[in-house]
């Protein structure tokens, strides 16, 4: 019988990822808000499970895409009794390394494998099936994990043991956050000096300070005033917190990551709870009394 894959967490990025999985293999989905899982099943031909336990019982491998490692643990425990030896959990959550090592140990006691497999590329990369996937886990589970993530991935790298994928993802997102904050503050200053925002971004993108933020996020979301909500500021703040823990655990001193964390917390206090991560720049604009256009 063909392998059946379970997908848990049909959020902003989980939904397009699950769509690719459901096109590739027989798939069962579960989501906390059941209506989303039922609508997904109707549209994709996947099966909707009523509980995490029902999903785990029906599947050979499971992919989770939840806000943090805490929710992953809740789901693992909710399915206790259904896990069986030889299954594999691939965790696409941007989680925390220490929590994932604990989850891997909990599953290991049941004979179940664990690979952390956070993704980068945003909701558009998920729609296109071109995400970058960072695998952390024991080498014996990696070939299977690769086949499970393949439907939504363009680049898949095994970067180390359990937790290494999450550590790398957290550092990546701290760099994203740093670029958002620094570009927003620098551009606000330039606009105040009378340099048109569009011209400043154009020159930076032909110079050495350019980044994904100046090349894509600012032109598409700030200069247009579109401010779409695809990846929440709350989740980015969580990622920078994980990155700070990674630095602390490895004894690396950093004022920079801590300053970026403070800037995100400051922005969260100003913006509404559903704000997107790029809206940090909207907060900077408001405080500076300028618009970057
Ligand atoms: P969303 O907030 O859009 O979705 C969260 C999902 O988790 C929903 O399916 C939600 O269910 C479910 N959920 C929340 N709390 C619980 C709980 N206690 N128990 C069970 N399920 C729960 O998040 P995203 O899809 O944006 O992000 C998911 C993960 O992917 C995060 O770790 C994020 O950092 C990461 N990520 C996101 C990217 C993006 O561009 N959005 C890019 C790269 C990584 P419900 O529908 O009921 O609310």
Image (spheres, helix red, strand yellow):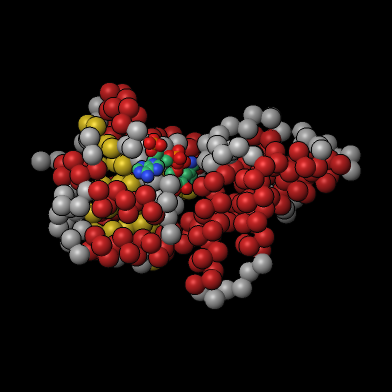
Q: Residue at x 33, y 64 (%)?
A: 102
Residue 71 visible in this rendered orientation of the protein:
yes
Quarter holding ligand 1: top left
Quadrant, the N terminus: top left
Q: Residue at x 58, y 32 (%)?
A: 228
x, y percentage for residue 48? 24, 32
x, y percentage for residue 38? 29, 27
Residue 159 picture quarter: bottom left
Which residue is at the far bottom?
251
Residue 126 visible in this rendered orientation of the protein:
no
Most foreground residue, 23 or 254: 254
x, y percentage for residue 15? 38, 35
**Looking at the picture, does residue 274 appear above or below residue 74?**
above
Residue 110 picture quarter: bottom left
x, y percentage for residue 220? 64, 34
Which residue is at the far right?
193
Quadrant, the C terminus: top right
- Left or right of 28? Residue 68 is right
**Looking at the picture, does residue 77 appear above or below residue 10?**
below
- Count of labels in the image: 0
Q: Residue at x 73, y 43 (%)?
A: 284
Q: Residue at x 63, y 62 (%)?
A: 258
- Left or right of 259? Residue 64 is left
């Amino acid at each position: 019988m063909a392998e059946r894959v379970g997908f848990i967490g049909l959020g902003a990025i989980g939904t397009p990822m699950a769509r690719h999985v459901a096109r590739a293999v027989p798939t069962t989905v579960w989501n906390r808000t059941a209506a989303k899982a039922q609508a997904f099943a109707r549209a994709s031909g996947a099966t909707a499970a009523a509980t995490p336990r029902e999903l785990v019982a029906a599947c050979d491998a499971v992919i989770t895409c939840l806000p943090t490692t805490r929710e992953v643990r809740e789901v693992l425990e909710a399915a206790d009794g259904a896990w069986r030896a030889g299954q594999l959990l691939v965790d696409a959550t941007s989680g925390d390394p220490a929590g994932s090592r604990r989850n891997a140990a909990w599953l290991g006691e049941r004979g179940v494998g664990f690979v952390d497999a956070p993704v980068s590329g945003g909701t558009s990369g998920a729609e296109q099936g071109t995400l970058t996937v960072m695998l952390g886990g024991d080498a014996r589970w990696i070939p299977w994990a690769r086949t499970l993530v393949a439907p939504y991935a363009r680049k898949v790298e095994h970067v180390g043991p359990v937790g290494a994928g999450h550590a790398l993802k957290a550092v990546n997102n701290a760099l994203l956050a740093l670029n958002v904050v620094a570009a927003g503050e620098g551009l606000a200053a330039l606009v105040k000096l009378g340099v048109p925002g569009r011209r400043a971004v154009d020159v930076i993108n032909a110079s050495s300070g350019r980044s994904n933020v100046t090349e894509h996020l600012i032109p598409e979301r700030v200069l247009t005033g579109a401010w779409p909500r695809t990846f929440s500021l709350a989740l980015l703040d969580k990622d920078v917190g994980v990155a700070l823990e990674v630095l602390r655990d490895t004894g690396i001193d950093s004022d920079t990551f801590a300053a970026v964390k403070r800037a995100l917390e400051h922005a969260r206090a100003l913006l509404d709870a559903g704000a997107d991560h790029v809206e940090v720049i909207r907060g900077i604009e408001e405080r500076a009394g300028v618009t970057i256009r």
